[in-house]
Amino acid sequence: MSYRWTTRAQYGIKALLELSLNGQQQPLSVKTIAERQSIPAPFLEKVLGALRQAGIVRSVRGVQGGYQLARPLTAISLAAILTALGEEICMVGDGSSSGVSDQVIQTLSERLSQRFAGVLADISLEDLYFDARSYKAAQEAAQSEVPEFMV
């Protein structure tokens, strides 16, 4: 049993991370987000459209327009993101059930799916934001370390 991240889910999360790292500064255009996150712009437009309909992002029109987060980071859960993108929030089992043991395993799968959905509801975009910032800081620190013989 596992959960498979769809491309749509991955792109949605990447786009929201890009917006969160941008803060509430100027809106980011689809082109900017697409370039920074290596996402095809036409696909990203559809993803951002779904997130806009769910009230997770808002669009700003005009020359300096683009997308911004519509809610605080703490108010955007991973479950809400996946739901907005039409993703099914459940563990994937094999679905076979012919005997008592199979029924027990099916019940276990359902219980695990419920717990999994609870975990996704508990993870906020703020959590992912801090993970991204920590990872970025670690990368920058590793790049700035210069061996002594090169000084």
Image (cartoon, rainbow, N blue to C red):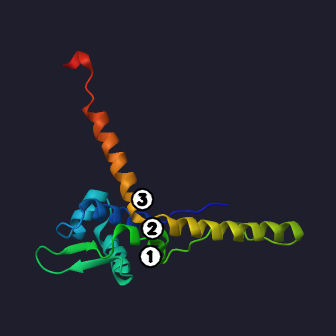
> Which secondary structure lies at badge 3?
helix
User: Crowding at label 1, few (<14), some or many (≥20) Cα neighbours within 10 Å?
Assistant: many
User: Crowding at label 3, few (<14), some or many (≥20) Cα neighbours within 10 Å?
Assistant: some
At 25% from the left and 18% from the top, the residue drawn is: 148
- The reply to whether the C-beta atoms of the residues labelled 2 and 1 are less than 8 Å apart is yes
Task: Name which quarter of the figure residue 89 lies in.
Answer: bottom right
The earlier-in-sequence mark between 3 and 2 is: 2
The earlier-in-sequence mark between 2 and 1 is: 2
Q: Which residue is mark 1?
A: 85
Q: Which residue is mark 3?
A: 127
Whole-number angstrom distance, CA of label 2 to CA of label 1: 7 Å
On the image, the x and y values in percent for residue 80 come to 46, 74
- The reply to whether the C-beta atoms of the residues labelled 1 and 3 are less than 8 Å apart is no
Left or right of 92, for residue 41 = left
User: Which amino acid lies under the numbered mark 3 shown in the image of this protein?
Assistant: Asp
Q: Which residue is mark 2?
A: 9
User: Which amino acid lies under the numbered mark 2 shown in the image of this protein?
Assistant: Ala
> Which secondary structure lies at badge 2?
helix
At 16% from the left and 75% from the top, the residue drawn is: 65
> Which secondary structure lies at badge 1?
loop
How many badges with numbers are in the image? 3
Q: Residue furthest bottom?
A: 53
Left or right of 148, for residue 126 = right
Q: Is residue 151 above or below residue 106?
A: above
Whole-number angstrom distance, CA of label 3 to CA of label 2: 17 Å
